[in-house]
Image (cartoon, grey):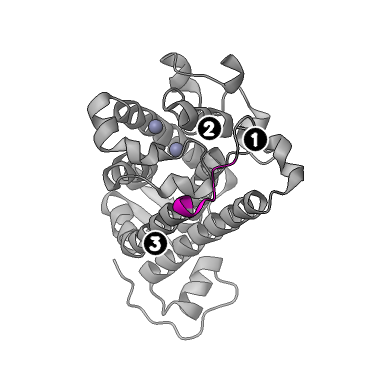
């Protein structure tokens, strides 16, 4: 619910989000939540994608050795591709303006989002992230798996697969039904049903998920900057999802390789 209490002089010693809530956001928890989640998404989305666009468009030679589909010429930034990306970005930006203010009410429906309290302990943040990742990966895998059945692929999922060489922004280019079921539902189901969650944890979750999906679509297997680099057996990522776009099959998971291993759908480029 929107907080209508007015506090004119925020205490500097109060928790960070409580402080900014009073100082900048008219003491409205809903407004603080909306702006913080919006800034989190935009920061990771634009920083990572501008970096990918910069190295791709300017053919920065240092990164060529990390490009996954080196055997193919770059297709990424032809005018037609740029047009698709621009359209996708505009639609997605508009959907954010509508969905993020509503997300606050959705997260408060079965539980409660704390805005004014202190940031939770590292332990709490950690176990909540593990639950978010496990449930997201489970739902993402199975919805994605079914989106590859003949009828659903032809009518819904094919739109996401027009990019055989993906790049960061491709993750938002998809049919609205796919964005809703495979992406949004999978991301938010656990946070919605979790009884007590904090705005910081929600922002961190947005950061991790958006970073993970841009990285998976980046087209570059860059060292150090992904969980896959450190835990290649367990974590899915760029190598798997790039293969998925190239062949339009296999590697249906998002964070983990577990469901793909279980269903024998795990493949890497070198297995060709
Ligand atoms: Zn994809
Ligand atoms: Zn797919």
Residue 219, image x, y percentages: 58, 39
Give the Cα separation between the discs numbered 3 and 2: 24 Å
92 displayed left or right of 62: left
For the image, the number of numbered tags is 3
Q: Nearer the viewer, residue 266 or 109?
A: 266
Disc 1 designates what residue?
221
Dot 1 falls on a residue whose secondary structure is: loop
Image quadrant, ligand 2 = top left
Decide if residue 29 is in sight here: yes
Decide if residue 15 is in sight here: no
Numbered badge on residue 90:
3
Residue lying at 24% horizontally and 36% vertically, measured from the top left: 155
Residue 116, image x, y percentages: 46, 65
Locate the N terminus by quadrant: bottom left
Give the Cα separation between the discs numbered 3 and 1: 28 Å
Q: Nearer the viewer, residue 244 or 15?
A: 244
Label 3 with label 2: CB-CB less than 8 Å: no
The answer to whether 13 is drawn above or below residue 254 in the figure is below
Disc 2 designates what residue?
242
In the image, the segment drawn in magenta is 74-81
Mark 3 and mark 2 lie on one chain; the one further toward the N terminus is 3
Instruction: Classify mark 2 as within 8 Å of ligand 1 or not, answering yes or no.
Output: no
Locate the C terminus by quadrant: top right
Label 1 with label 2: CB-CB less than 8 Å: yes
Q: Residue furthest bottom?
A: 8
Find residue 51 and report its image quarter.
Answer: bottom right
Mark 3 and mark 1 lie on one chain; the one further toward the N terminus is 3
Dot 3 falls on a residue whose secondary structure is: helix
Task: Indicate whether residue 78 is drawn in magenta.
Answer: yes
């Amino acid at each position: 619910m929107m907080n209508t209490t007015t506090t004119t002089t925020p205490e500097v010693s109060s928790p960070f989000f409580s402080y900014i809530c009073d100082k900048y956001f008219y003491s409205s928890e809903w407004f603080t939540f909306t702006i913080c989640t919006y800034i989190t998404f935009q920061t990771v989305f634009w920083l990572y994608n501008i970096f990918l666009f910069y190295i791709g468009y300017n053919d920065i030679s240092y990164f060529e050795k990390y490009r996954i589909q080196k055997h193919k010429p770059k297709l990424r930034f032809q005018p037609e591709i740029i047009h698709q990306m621009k359209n996708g970005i505009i639609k997605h930006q508009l959907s954010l303006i509508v969905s993020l203010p509503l997300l606050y009410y959705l997260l408060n429906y079965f539980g409660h989002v704390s805005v004014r309290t202190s940031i939770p302990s590292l332990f709490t943040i950690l176990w909540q992230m593990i639950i978010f990742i496990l449930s997201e990966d489970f739902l993402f895998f199975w919805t994605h798996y079914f989106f590859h059945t003949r009828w659903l692929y032809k009518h819904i999922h094919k739109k996401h697969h027009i990019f055989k060489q993906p790049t960061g922004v491709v993750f938002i280019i998809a049919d609205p039904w796919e964005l809703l079921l495979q992406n949004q539902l999978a991301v938010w189901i656990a946070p919605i049903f979790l009884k007590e969650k904090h705005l910081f944890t929600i922002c961190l979750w947005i950061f991790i998920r958006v970073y993970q999906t841009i990285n998976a679509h980046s087209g570059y297997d860059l060292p150090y900057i992904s969980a896959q680099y450190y835990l290649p057996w367990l974590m899915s990522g760029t190598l798997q999802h790039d293969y998925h776009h190239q062949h339009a099959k296999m590697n249906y998971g998002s964070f983990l390789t577990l469901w793909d291993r279980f269903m024998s759908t795990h493949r890497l480029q070198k297995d060709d």
